[in-house]
Image: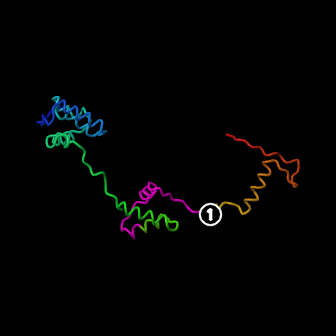
Amino acid sequence: MMRTRRFDLTEHLSEDALDRAINEAQKADEGRLVRRLCFVKNLYAGDVLEEAARRVGVSQANSSRWAHAWNDAGVDGLRPSFGGGRPPKLSGKQFAELCDILEEGKPWTPREIHTLIKDRYGVTYDPAHLSRKLRESGMHYAKPRPMDPRRPDDADEILAERLAEALGEESSEKTEEEEPIVFGFFR
């Protein structure tokens, strides 16, 4: 047998005003508020808490909390009120200063950046999070190499030789018996 519980709901708005509030919340792209207002509309229509909660897909605990918030403060009581997450460890000014330091100096290793942040600001970041924050600010990690370490010493000579072969330029050392070079794309 399903347990039903009636709830004494305060009617802060008429049904028409509630419909207008739902439409305004939809236009303002406040999906969470729309869902909560639809829950209240179901209660206005005579649903018990469990039925109204089932219709909008919410748990009974949340439905009770929403109903009490509606009774206490109306539409404003149903507005989600979360702080937006944990505050950053470095303020915007500190992070901008860090970026300036990293841009002006030598190449930095990730370990050196972590040490700099810990020594200068007294905080630590997870390496993955720090690299994400630095990429978001436009910085990218790269190993500075003036030259590819795999490059042979005589790379220029090899290139010139291969170009001459590819362009069909005959050198005095070649014989006519060599196979021609074929260009193409294969799968």
Give the residue pinned by disc 1.
146
Q: Residue at x 50, y 57 (%)?
A: 140
Who is closer to the viewer here, 137 or 50? 137
- Magenta residues span 117-144
User: Residue 111 appears at what percent x and percent y?
Assistant: 47, 66
User: Residue 22 appears at what percent x and percent y?
Assistant: 24, 34
User: Which of the 4 image quarters holds residue 152?
Assistant: bottom right
The residue under label 1 is which amino acid type? Pro
Q: Is residue 174 left or right of residue 6?
A: right
Please tell me whether residue 118 belongs to the stretch shown in magenta. yes
User: Which of the 4 image quarters holds residue 19?
Assistant: top left
SS label for mark 1 = loop
Residue extending furthest toward the left? 8
User: Residue 170 appears at what percent x and percent y?
Assistant: 85, 51
Please tell me whether residue 28 belongs to the stretch shown in magenta. no
Q: Residue at x 19, y 35 (%)?
A: 40
**Tally of numbered tags:** 1
Figure check: 41 above or below 158: above
Q: Residue at x 24, y 32 (%)?
A: 55
